[in-house]
């Protein structure tokens, strides 16, 4: 009865995971979907703790189990409540890395367990529960989980500025060789594991960790959303390996869903940048120092005052707002929504143009604006926004840079050439808010800033928006 009830718990959990993921695709139902999936996870955890049996025995170390759950729950809740929106990508990378670490630890634990319960000769064919196939899953979970953990930690450090891009000549070739060596050693262990070579398991672990770190080091900041998505898919696959090891249907389903969703999101983001995944991983886009210094003489830019900007926007028929990372840094999403409502009261049509890779993680701008209760109906995806720019009177660019750079369309020598952008230069006028003229995350100068229809409005995004609101109210 216990086993059938546990299977039912896993079935319920699996269904809630699928429903929750489906509901996450719509901002109106995303919160509810998240709660449904979390509820399914609670059912799976409780069912495992009280109903799981191993050789006829239930779990008994409840002190360690509930101690870990309480500590983890408190740490997660504290981090979630305290994290700023600007640090959300870093937290996603950190938590994703913890998932990869858990998968690697599961593989390590299972390797010890099956090794200690077999004959002294470590005959792989005598291993319980499937023999060599079980060891194969253990090694896959070890490599993928370790790569995900190490890569996510480097991504976390690069996002918060603690770690800089690191490259050396022949790095990509070295990385490939390193990965092939790790896979070859894993294959050797799979074929001839014995008491004399079991230590190679830890060599594989070390090589996978080193590869994970070197894999992310050279990838430039502009590609970080793609990397986060890819590493997330790795963690899902590693978790699925754990589901195979324990015949845990909920863990298997959850891992497959995360792995599949992360892979599809990675493909979609690469498509949005008009680049292949191989180009992202091998191209070091936005990470080369040459790109940061490759500036050209484009003439001068012009500035606009708060008063003039407020007047232009207040008397426009249609305004399009383009949010970028600068908006997140300034925590200006609420002020932006207030400006939107003020303009709408004056009869101005206001929309938001969202680029798929704006910010530091997939969907960063959508999450940011949702926090300020901006209506999802006002958010236009890139293709739809580009259709409306020619009929837009004023575009207000808030901290976005590379995703509005016309060089992506016009300059074959540009590192971002070919990447689809928000074509803000098609509007009648464009106001760009930045702190300074420094290049964006890709490290290249923006041609938009020097165009005749563009005016620069320097300053902190939140302060600028608050000043615009005060000025428009006085008109």
Image: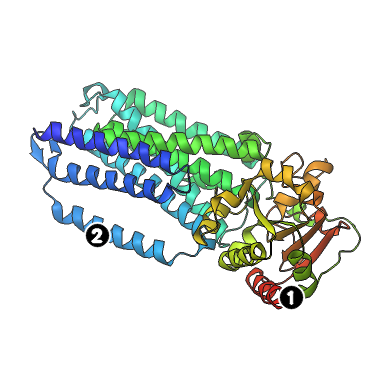
Q: Give 378 or 419, whichever is nearer the viewer.
A: 378
55 relative to 304 in the view: left or right: left
The quadrant where residue 24 appears? top left
Residue at 49% x, 58% y is 88
Residue at 86% x, 66% y is 302
**Spot occupied by residue 26 in the image (x, y as percentages of width and height):** 48, 44
Q: Give 352 or 250, whichever is nearer the viewer.
A: 352
**Badge 1 is on which residue?**
475
Q: Give 335 or 443, whichever is nearer the viewer.
A: 335
Q: Is residue 294 visible?
A: no
> Counting other residues with Cα less than 10 Å from the Cα at mark 1, is it few (<14), some (14-19), or many (20 or more)?
few
**Spot occupied by residue 406 in the image (x, y as percentages of width and height):** 80, 48
The relative height of residue 304 versus residue 319 in the rendered view (above or below) is below
> Sequence-wise, which precedes: disc 1 or disc 2?
2
State the quadrant of the N terminus: top left
The relative height of residue 96 versus residue 279 in the rendered view (above or below) is below
Give the secondary structure at mark 2: helix
**Spot occupied by residue 273 in the image (x, y as percentages of width and height):** 67, 40
| 1 or 2: mark nearer the eye | 1
Residue at 57% x, 47% y is 225
Numbered-mark total: 2
103 relative to 473 in the view: left or right: left
**Spot occupied by residue 266 in the image (x, y as percentages of width and height):** 55, 38
Q: Is residue 12 visible?
A: yes
**Badge 2 is on which residue?**
70
* Cα separation between marks 1 and 2: 55 Å
């Amino acid at each position: 009865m216990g086993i059938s009830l546990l299977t039912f718990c896993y079935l319920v959990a699996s269904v809630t995971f699928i429903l929750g993921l489906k509901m996450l695709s719509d901002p109106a139902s995303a919160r509810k979907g998240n709660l449904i999936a979390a509820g399914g996870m609670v059912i799976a955890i409780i069912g495992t703790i009280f109903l799981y049996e191993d050789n006829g025995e239930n779990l008994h170390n409840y002190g360690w189990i509930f101690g870990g759950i309480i500590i983890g729950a408190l740490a997660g809740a504290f981090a979630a409540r305290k994290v700023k929106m600007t640090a959300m990508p870093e937290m996603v990378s950190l938590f994703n890395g913890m998932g990869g670490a858990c998968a690697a630890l599961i593989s390590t634990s299972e390797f010890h367990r099956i090794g200690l319960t077999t004959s002294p000769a470590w005959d792989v064919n005598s291993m319980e529960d499937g023999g060599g196939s079980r060891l194969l899953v253990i090694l896959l979970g070890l490599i993928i989980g370790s790569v995900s953990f190490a890569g996510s930690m480097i991504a976390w450090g690069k996002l918060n500025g603690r770690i800089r891009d690191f490259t050396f000549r022949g790095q990509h070739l070295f990385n490939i060789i390193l990965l092939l060596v790790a896979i070859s050693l894993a294959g050797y262990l799979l074929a001839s594991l014995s008491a004399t070579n079991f230590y190679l398991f830890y060599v594989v672990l070390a090589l996978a960790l080193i590869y994970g770190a070197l894999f992310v080091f050279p990838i430039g900041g502009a590609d970080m959303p793609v990397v986060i998505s890819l590493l997330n898919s790795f963690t899902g696959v590693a978790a699925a390996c754990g589901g195979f090891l324990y015949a845990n249907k909920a863990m298997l389903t959850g891992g497959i869903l995360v792995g599949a969703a992360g892979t599809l999101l990675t493909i979609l983001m690469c498509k949005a940048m008009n680049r292949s995944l191989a180009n992202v991983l091998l191209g070091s886009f936005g990470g080369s120092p040459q790109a940061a210094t490759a500036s050209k003489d484009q003439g001068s830019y012009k500035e606009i005052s708060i008063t003039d900007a407020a007047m232009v926007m207040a008397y426009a028929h249609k305004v399009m707002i383009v949010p970028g990372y600068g908006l997140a840094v300034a925590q200006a999403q609420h002020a932006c929504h207030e400006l939107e409502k003020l303009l709408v009261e004056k009869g101005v049509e206001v929309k938001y143009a969202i680029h798929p890779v704006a910010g530091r993680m997939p969907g960063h701008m959508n999450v940011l604006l949702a926090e300020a209760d901006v209506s999802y109906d006002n958010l236009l995806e890139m293709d739809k926004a580009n259709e409306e720019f020619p009929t837009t009177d004023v575009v207000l660019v808030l901290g976005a840079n590379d995703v509005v750079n016309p060089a992506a369309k016009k300059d074959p020598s540009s590192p971002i050439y070919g990447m689809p952008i928000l074509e803000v230069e098609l509007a009648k006028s464009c106001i760009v808010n930045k702190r300074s003229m420094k290049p964006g995350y890709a490290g290249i100068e923006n041609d938009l800033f020097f165009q005749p229809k563009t005016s620069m409005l320097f300053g902190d995004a939140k302060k600028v928006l608050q000043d615009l609101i005060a000025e428009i109210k006085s008109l």
